[in-house]
Image: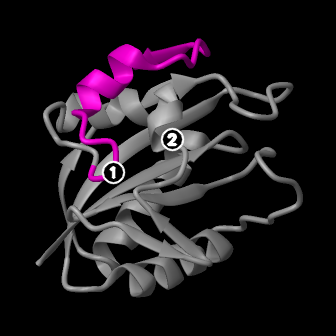
Amino acid sequence: MNKVYLLIGGNMGDMAASLAIAKKEITKRVGRINLSSSIYKTAAWGLENQPDFLNQVLAVDSDLQAQEILKIILDIECRMGRIREMKNGPRLIDIDILLFNEDIIDEENLKIPHSFLHRRNFTLAPLAEIVPNMVHPVLKKSIMQLLQESQDRLPVQRL
């Protein structure tokens, strides 16, 4: 059984409903959700002139491999109406693989741990809520330590 940590989020439409739909689809198609962080309201990162996001981290047990999960979550995004128009732009739903077991994956279409995991408080805060002592497999620091050392100053509010 693989332990997968996913970040779900969005900043368009009924964001709470989108998170609920994404969770239902993840449960049906990826695996059982064991832990869910609180929902966090977060300022947009990268392209800041847009509405705030709602984000949540999920810990999922899955029989699937990382590339299979990637295909499924991209399909879920597409079916939910995600259109990729601009990098870091507004979106109905976004689902990212943050961590997969303690694996390090460096493939053209998949980087695990997520390349920006340690630089974004909107990812670190909900992850630290559910697994504060988990160690980043590359940086060898706990998620809580990464959050405490983070230089990201954008607001992240637990709802």
Numbered marks: total: 2
The answer to which quarter of the image holds residue 69 is: bottom left
Return the residue nearer the eye: 141 or 42: 141
The answer to which quarter of the image holds residue 116 is: top right
Residue 120: percent from left, percent from top: 53, 32
Q: Is residue 21 left or right of residue 48?
A: left
Of the residues shown, which amino acid type is indicated by label 1? Val
Of the residues shown, which amino acid type is indicated by label 2? Ala
Residue depicted at 44% across the width and 84% down the height: 67
Residue on which the image places disc 1: 138
Magenta part of the chain: 137-159
Give the residue furthest to the front. Answer: 139
Residue depicted at 72% across the width and 64% down the height: 82
- Cα–Cα span, label 2 and label 1: 33 Å
**Residue 115 colored in magenta in the image:** no
Residue depicted at 48% across the width and 51% down the height: 8
